[in-house]
Image: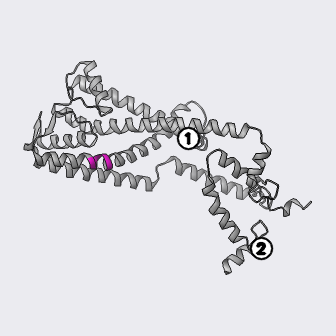
């Protein structure tokens, strides 16, 4: 039997040639890890820049729409308050597809503009707001985990690990909390400012966040429409994110169940035959890992084939393992 060190199928997860770091190297490693954790717990500069770009694009988009509908304000009929405010409000209820019907276009030009704006709003506005909402939920979920462990001694590394492990769950919880807060705020505002009964206010909130928009209840005062511009954008997108995370949570739960089943089930002779990629009647650690990843749905045959082809090209001496000589030959050719 060949020595284990010469076996090309030796586990890829083990590297005996790598010595343990000395005390100074370990201390340097811990400092680097601490810095990395701190960086992950704080908003990255690229993320902040991206959010700024999203915000500027949204402002530009709403600005163009507001200008168009302000210039055609006489071609829009309904309950009006202030020319510019009504134009912004009309933009928001159009791009979010709420469409109360309290303001409606009644000329050909206004109708064409509304048609263009609703399609661009669904395609661009939803994407822009979705990215912004996703960014905010990503950042707030860390604060949620910190709050949940407020009375415990938990270091930043453990918090980060918990967030990464249960990322979808915390995103869903955060979206749920934000959505409930927005619905409560909307109900209270409609009750106190728009003077609606509590049940009517709640009914208006529900028909708005779901973009049902019957139109029998809406924002009709100046203060109400100022509030609506921000609240409608936030609440409708938050509900969309809520259902997105709910779907992801369900999918992740099913995936974890599949992984548990794959790891627990007994291997058969047919499994060994299927896992033997190089047909040498033995399954290496790498082949076993690849086979199990395929079973879990993490990778597919289409993912593996080009990698195997690349490996065979690099393996110049056809030994079944890559060596320094193989790399030198591949660089020379």
Disc 2 secondary structure class: loop
Q: What residue occupies the far left of the structure in this picture?
A: 74
Task: Establish if 169 lies above or below 23.
Answer: above
Who's the residue at 65% across and 49% down the image? 294
Segment colored magenta: 119-123
Distance in Å between CA atoms under marks 2 and 1: 46 Å
Q: Looking at the image, tell me whether mark 2 or mark 1 is earlier in sequence order.
A: 1
Task: Establish if 220 lies above or below 298.
Answer: above
Q: Give left or right: position of 1 versus 196.
A: right
Residue 258 location, quadrant? top right
Q: Depth check: give the residue in front, 248 or 135.
A: 248
Residue 317 disc label: 2
Quadrant where the C terminus is found in the figure: bottom right
Quadrant where the N terminus is found in the figure: bottom right
Q: Depth check: give the residue in front, 175 or 145.
A: 175
Disc 1 secondary structure class: helix
Task: Establish if 242 lies above or below 54.
Answer: above
Residue 194 visible in the current orientation: yes
Q: Position of residue 106 (x, y in %)?
A: 10, 41
Task: Establish if 17 lies above or below 84.
Answer: below
Q: Give left or right: position of 218 versus 135.
A: left
Query: Circle 1 is placed at which residue position?
Result: 163
Q: Position of residue 211 (x, y in %)?
A: 30, 34
Assign the magenta stretch its main secondary structure: helix
Give yes or no for contact between labels 2 and 1 (Cβ–Cβ under 8 Å): no
């Amino acid at each position: 039997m060949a020595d284990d060190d010469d076996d090309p199928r030796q586990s890829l997860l083990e590297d005996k040639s790598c010595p343990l770091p000395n005390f100074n190297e370990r201390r340097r490693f811990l400092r680097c890890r601490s810095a990395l954790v701190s960086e992950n717990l704080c908003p990255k500069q690229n993320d902040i820049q991206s959010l700024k770009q999203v915000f500027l694009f949204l402002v530009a988009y709403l600005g163009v729409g507001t200008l168009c509908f302000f210039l055609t304000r006489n071609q829009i009929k309904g309950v009006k308050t202030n020319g510019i405010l009504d134009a912004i409000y009309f933009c928001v209820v159009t791009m979010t597809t709420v469409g109360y019907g309290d303001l409606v276009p009644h000329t050909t030009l206004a109708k064409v503009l509304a048609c263009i704006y609703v399609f661009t709003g669904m395609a661009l506005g939803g994407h822009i707001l979705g990215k912004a909402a996703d960014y905010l939920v990503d950042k707030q979920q860390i604060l949620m985990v910190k709050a949940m462990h407020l009375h415990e001694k938990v270091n930043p590394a453990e918090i980060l690990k918990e967030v990464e492990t249960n990322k979808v769950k915390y995103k869903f919880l955060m979206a749920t909390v934000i959505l409930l807060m927005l619905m409560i705020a909307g109900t209270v505002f409609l009750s106190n400012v728009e003077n609606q009964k509590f049940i009517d206010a709640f009914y208006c909130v529900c028909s708005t966040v779901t973009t049902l928009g019957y139109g029998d209840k809406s924002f009709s005062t100046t203060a109400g429409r100022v509030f609506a511009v921000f609240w409608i954008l936030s609440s409708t997108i938050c509900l969309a994110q809520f259902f997105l995370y709910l779907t992801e949570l369900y999918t992740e739960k099913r995936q974890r169940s599949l992984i548990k089943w794959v790891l627990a089930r007994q291997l058969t002779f047919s499994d060994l035959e299927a896992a033997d990629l190089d047909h040498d009647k033995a399954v290496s650690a790498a082949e076993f890992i690849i086979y199990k990843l395929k079973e879990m749905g993490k990778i597919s045959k289409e993912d593996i084939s080009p990698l195997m082809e690349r490996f065979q090209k690099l393996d110049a001496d056809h030994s079944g393992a890559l060596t320094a000589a193989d790399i030198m030959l591949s660089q020379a050719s």
